[in-house]
Amino acid sequence: MLSDKMLAERTAYMGTSAIREILKVLSRPGVVSLAGGMPAPEAFPMEHLEGLFQRVLKKHGTNAMQYGTTEGFRPLQEALVDYLGGLGVEAKPEEINTTTGSQGVLDSLGKILITPGDALAVEAPTYLGALQAFNPYGPKYVQMETDGDGLIPESMEEVVKKHHPKLVYLIPTFQNPTGRTIPLERRKEIARIAMENDTLVVEDDPYGQLRYHGDFVTPIKAFAPDHVIYCGSFSKVFAPGLRVGFYLAPGIVQDWLVLAKQGVDLHTSSLSQALAAEFLVEGFMEKHVPRITGLYAPKMKAMLTAMREFFPDSFTWTEPEGGMFIWAEGPAGLDTTALYGRAIENKVAFVPGRYFYAEARTGLATMRLNFTMADEETLRLAIERLAATIREAL
Amino acid sequence: MLSDKMLAERTAYMGTSAIREILKVLSRPGVVSLAGGMPAPEAFPMEHLEGLFQRVLKKHGTNAMQYGTTEGFRPLQEALVDYLGGLGVEAKPEEINTTTGSQGVLDSLGKILITPGDALAVEAPTYLGALQAFNPYGPKYVQMETDGDGLIPESMEEVVKKHHPKLVYLIPTFQNPTGRTIPLERRKEIARIAMENDTLVVEDDPYGQLRYHGDFVTPIKAFAPDHVIYCGSFSKVFAPGLRVGFYLAPGIVQDWLVLAKQGVDLHTSSLSQALAAEFLVEGFMEKHVPRITGLYAPKMKAMLTAMREFFPDSFTWTEPEGGMFIWAEGPAGLDTTALYGRAIENKVAFVPGRYFYAEARTGLATMRLNFTMADEETLRLAIERLAATIREAL
């Protein structure tokens, strides 16, 4: 009989996914889920898909069906130059690489940079999927402190000087899970720290376009181009099912990232990349994004309004300017993981916040709430149910 | 300044891709390439794509654009049950997982099974892309001997008993690079050896449908279901640009493979999977594959005929029953890598065979020739040029 003994040592870092188990109960009938991280299906440009597909066939023909280079589908690399320019980030087409979702580059970064035991600095809390991408490579996570304005630069500087992390992983805009955005002055500080200490920073930016109010903030990449890997995605502005992301990395890691990706999937779907290219070239990014933000802004407002009405005074929560999530924190002593089972009985689901911390037993009183999937009335109902569940537990 | 010092130790196993450098000169004007491994663009069902896309939108709607499960797009998992049944391989939908090309599962296998230094057995020669997928995990490759009928079971048994490899990687049908097919009796022997020694075997089968003559041979999976990971792909029968592959793994590794993939790309393109599902459900596999084999069979024949006419008597080569490649071997002392530059000057390209061996300095006199991309007249011309180049060198 084959047995677990044949597994690689690194599977010890991978663990089984506790959160996968937790989220399985979501599908019970009547449960309103605030646990997801998916765009609303109404946010997809379904009525334009046939037109886009026809354009792809007409313009790219068999190239949209053929093997492509690992680096990326050239028309998409070219279209991304203008897009990135609009964010204040300068790039030549050949400096931009595409990935299978923005998840793809995280795996490659772990592969080329992390020897087991190497330090990797993350915000506390951070994106769970990034931890899952990095875990197999055995990093020693070091948490950096955050406040209402996201990462505290002094904490990053301390961590960088003390632990010399191979990588500092950040989601500076509408962070997953908190919804927080790092302000401009802090971004410049982060850039300075990265340059002074020769530290590589990942700026993961899948949510940047989903701004409901407030002003655009220039990416950190613009202030430290040789030290920042900027990662973008079409998942939240076009469709996640296409699995198209992209990144702009300093030359010193770019070739290695391409080589790592070649072994993993040869290249990202040519058809998906061609559709993303036409989405940009045909101006859908400008035309379509306002429809998405117009859909999500009232949802976020409805959730925040309901939280003010129903949540106990002992709770605090973020009031983001965009993105997909609100982050709530209860009083010390509350364990939202214990709360989860009762919430499901009351027909509402959320993600206990502890899963977003690299260090165990942290953030026990926190939770992540998603507002993009349900309608406003349902969101209000869900928050009312969740608040009732919390009051029972307190 | 950032430097190479930050790279993970495992990058030492990854190397830079010498073959990438070699293949760059392919794009010189006038060079006929026999070096590729791509399907002919005429083999894509371009005239059916719009219809398939419309069906996908009508039947799957926003599900074809939304995030999906790592395990796979359920309608594709279901459609694959019948397909695999037709090959003599029994499976339930939930036992079949999809991947981003069949490359995807190779990376995951390396990740969950190989601790640096673990033995991994491969045919000599084997698929270069598999080596690239496994390399970052630091396996110690052990080569198994082959002859005109592919892998020699006695060699596998010796290697398995002596080195206890974590994995035996095979392409039993129309192998890349040799085009050889392992006959039924040997497959049963391989299954017996795997079961008796509790060895995990990867049966990579991207070319199986491309049979031009001779009889179908049942996959090894059918004879040792608990010890074989069967991997298939839509790249050679539909379109490689979609990046859709699939595998059927014993339960003991299946959950780990899914967990590994989740960190890498969350899931394979939903749109690509939905297109592949409709391709199967609508019977395109049966209807379209004969068109592909009808296109490739005369190409293979043209190449073999030209080789008989022009190649020196000191060469031998395979005469496959299907697939995309012919494997040629020159007299001892010939170095096809040295020949490559002169071949490019004579406007023909091939892949020096040494790149398909896990052990260095092996197969120096061999070369892989692809016949799917050029037309018959051009193939004849290319073989004539290549033979002239060889005669200059001998």
Image: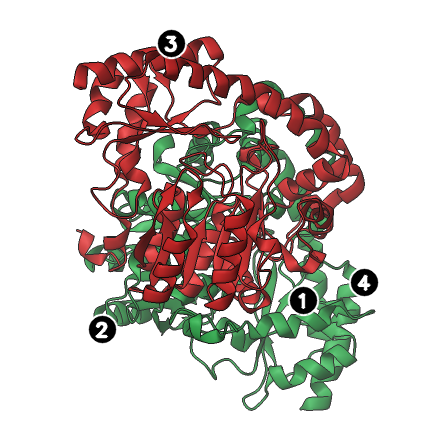
Chain colours: A green, B red
Q: Nearer the viewer, mark 4 or mark 1?
A: 4
Marks 1 and 2, the one that precedes in the sequence: 2
What amino acid does circle 3 point to?
A: Leu
Marks 2 and 4, the one that precedes in the sequence: 2
User: Residue tagged by mark 3?
Assistant: B381
Q: Point out residue B66 in the picture as x, y percentages from the top left corner.
A: 67, 49
Neighbor class of circle 2 (other Cα within 10 Å; few <14, some 14-19, many 20+) is few
Residues at badges 3 and 2 in contact (C-beta under 8 Å)?
A: no
Q: Chain of mark 3?
A: B
What amino acid does circle 2 point to?
A: Lys
In this rendering, the answer to whether A112 lies above or below A161 is above
In this rendering, the answer to whether B190 lies above or below B271 is below
Q: Point out residue A227 in the picture as x, y percentages from the top left corner.
A: 28, 51
Q: Point out residue A212 in the picture as x, y percentages from the top left corner.
A: 61, 51
Q: Is residue A267 visible?
A: yes
Q: Nearer the viewer, mark 1 or mark 3?
A: 3
Neighbor class of circle 1 (other Cα within 10 Å; few <14, some 14-19, many 20+) is many
Marks 4 and 1, the one that precedes in the sequence: 1
In three-dimensional space, the C-alpha distance between marks 1 and 2, rounded to whole angstroms, equals 39 Å
**Callout 4: SS:** helix
Q: Chain of mark 2?
A: A
Q: Are marks 3 and 4 on the same chain?
A: no
User: Residue tagged by mark 4?
Assistant: A377
* Residue in the image at 21% along x and 23% along y: B339
Residue nearer the viewer, B126 or A14 = B126
**Callout 1: SS:** helix
Q: Are marks 3 and 2 on the same chain?
A: no
Q: Quadrant of residue A278?
A: top right
